[in-house]
Amino acid sequence: MTSIRIGLCQWKIGAPTGIAGWAARLEREVAYAAGQGARLLVMPEYAPLEAAAGEVADLEGELVRALDGAEAMLEAARAVAMRHQVWLVPGSLAMRRGGQVVNRAPLIAQDGRVAFQDKHVMTRFEAEQWGVSPGAAPSVFETDFGRIGIAICFDSEFPALVRAQVVAGAWLILVPSCTDTLRGFNRVRVASAARAMENQCFVAMAPTVGEAPWCGTLDANRGHAAVFGPIDKGFPEDGVIAQGTLDAGEWVFANLDSASLESVRRDGQVRNHLSWPQDPPPCPVLVPA
């Protein structure tokens, strides 16, 4: 049984300041959240791309600068995590991997160790405009507060991906996200809530927010952070543990305890986690007689 105080950043995209400016902002944000007692901090998908923005929106140039600066961004984030002694997902990075471009979310331990979760299913923008390739299949991370998983944005919309992480022992799924419309945001929000319900686990999402016309990739950003749990006794009736203000730059905090999940999985009104079919059942075709 483990517990953790989590902080989710609604990262409002700022003006171009380069890697140094982004790193300084990350330092301030992490210092604030650590001061609120959070030990696991989550920034949104592609939030570090703020460091790759130029004076005018330029999709191709932003991708090149993001790829060239990825290692420097990662090292800056490692230094911040170690200084403040937190576990940190600094957002996701466009990175080169085996001759391809992938979207990778680092999980940085408080001692600076790093492991990555790749985005596995690409959006049309990533595949058609940026040439981002599907990354590695879902994994789980071993931490000092138990096993957790990361499902980057669109990946949260595919039940089998998150289910694989839960079966491997993850009790908390992190969803760093970046959506430019309320429809996109609500797809990820509804998916995150559904994954929490059907797996009787916690799912925590953190989005980019705000308008940034100087950044071709992050020009429009809608959403709010939220933490979802099972919709069962001992939890809120709508499953919402915490949520932020739509489109505001702010932090959302929640105290999460895996023991509450063990209790509801064992003695809830329903047992979604236990009752999940091991294999899809046969689906016959019926013809009305």
Image (cartoon, grey):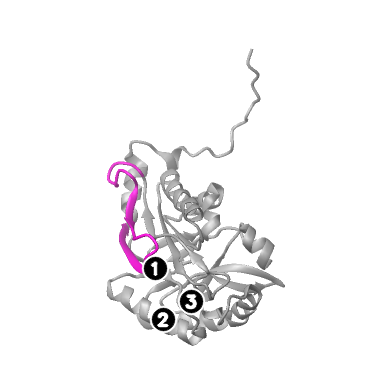
Looking at the image, which is closer to me, 206 or 104?
206
Q: Mark 3 or mark 1, which is nearer the start of the sequence?
A: 1
Rendered residue at 33%/64% (across/down): 252
Closer to the observer: label 1 or label 3? Answer: 1
| Bounds of the magenta segment | 231-256
Which part of the image, by quadrant, shows the N terminus? bottom left
Look at mark 1 in the image and give the residue it sits on. Answer: 9
Say if residue 85 shows up in the picture: no
Q: Which mark is residue 113?
A: 3
Residue 37's x, y, as percent?
28, 71
Q: Quadrant of residue 281?
A: top right
Q: Is residue 234 rendered magenta in the image?
A: yes
Q: Are marks 3 and 2 in contact (CB under 8 Å)?
A: no
Disc 1: CA contacts within 10 A as few (<14), some (14-19) or many (>=20): many
Q: Quadrant of residue 233?
A: top left
Look at mark 2 in the image and give the residue it sits on. Answer: 25
Relative to 207, does residue 111 appear above or below in the rendering? below
Where disc 1 sits, the SS reads: strand
